Image (cartoon, rainbow, N blue to C red):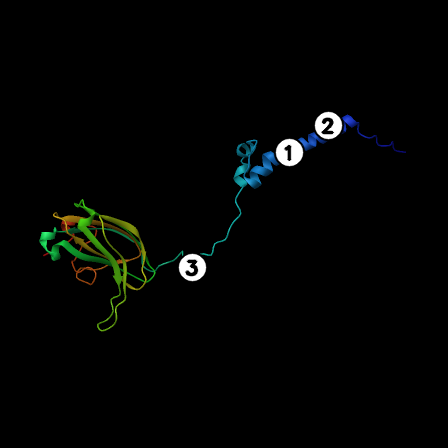
Amino acid sequence: MSEPIRPMPKGRLIAATLGALALAALIVLGAILPAEFNRDPLGLGGLSGLSRLWAPEDRQVDPAAGGVARAREYDTPFRTDVVEIPLGDFLAGAERSELEYKVRMRKDATLIYAWEVIGAREPRDFHFDQHGHTTPAPGQPMAVATYRQAFGLRQQGALSAPFDGIQGWQFSNSSEAPVVVRLRLAGFYELIPAGQPGNEAGIVANVPAARARPAAP
């Protein structure tokens, strides 16, 4: 016949209960709060690495919201270029002091650009017209998009082409000194050969300004 189980002495029961509560509190404060709620009151989460397990709840975002694709792929190779465009002062006449420079882009292609004017001090002495247009066959209508017309000595940004065509700037120098427009390009585009629409001035990319406009009158 087995002996009856003796109840735990009251003192030991209280001590065991308090120990269990203390251990549970340690687990909650030192492990669960850092790992699940990004709270670390005891600093044990950082020491043990449990804080790194915490992550906020994901919120899914529709990348096509607003009808604009946020991620695209292109057939045109990625490229970068630096174009130095020399312009004469206003006394040199329109043929020397202003010109149009564009690149060829497919619809929805992206161009990242930054340009600055070297040699001018007053923003009001330099005007730019950023625009693009299609190059239709003779007798066909042309689509034109104007992005910005302003005075200034620098601009930087990105452009997504609204159609197949050419995109770029008309630069005009009205200062009393020659200037150079240093244009940095990156993205999915093609340079336009000298003499074709968008580069009638024959600008050569990736060479110093002194050799960038061999066809200048």
Q: Nearer the viewer, residue 124 or 45?
A: 124
For the residues labelled 2 and 1, the Cα–Cα distance comes to: 15 Å
**Which amino acid does the dot numbered 3 rest on?**
Gly
Q: Tell me the residue at 9%/52% (across/down).
A: 91
Residue behind mark 3: 66
Depicted 20 relative to depicted 57: above or below: above
Is label 2 in contact with label 1 (beta carbons under 8 Å)?
no
Q: Tell me the residue at 70%/30% (across/down).
A: 18
First-in-chain label (2 vs 1): 2
The label number, if any, that marks residue 15 in the structure image: 2
**Which amino acid does the dot numbered 1 rest on?**
Ala
Mark 3 lies on a secondary structure that is: helix
Q: Tell me the residue at 53%/37% (across/down).
A: 51
Where residue 80 sits in the image (x, y, percent)? 28, 51
Mark 2 lies on a secondary structure that is: helix
**Which amino acid does the dot numbered 2 rest on?**
Ala
31 displayed left or right of 130? right
Dot 1 crowding, Cα within 10 Å, few <14, some 14–19, many 20+: few
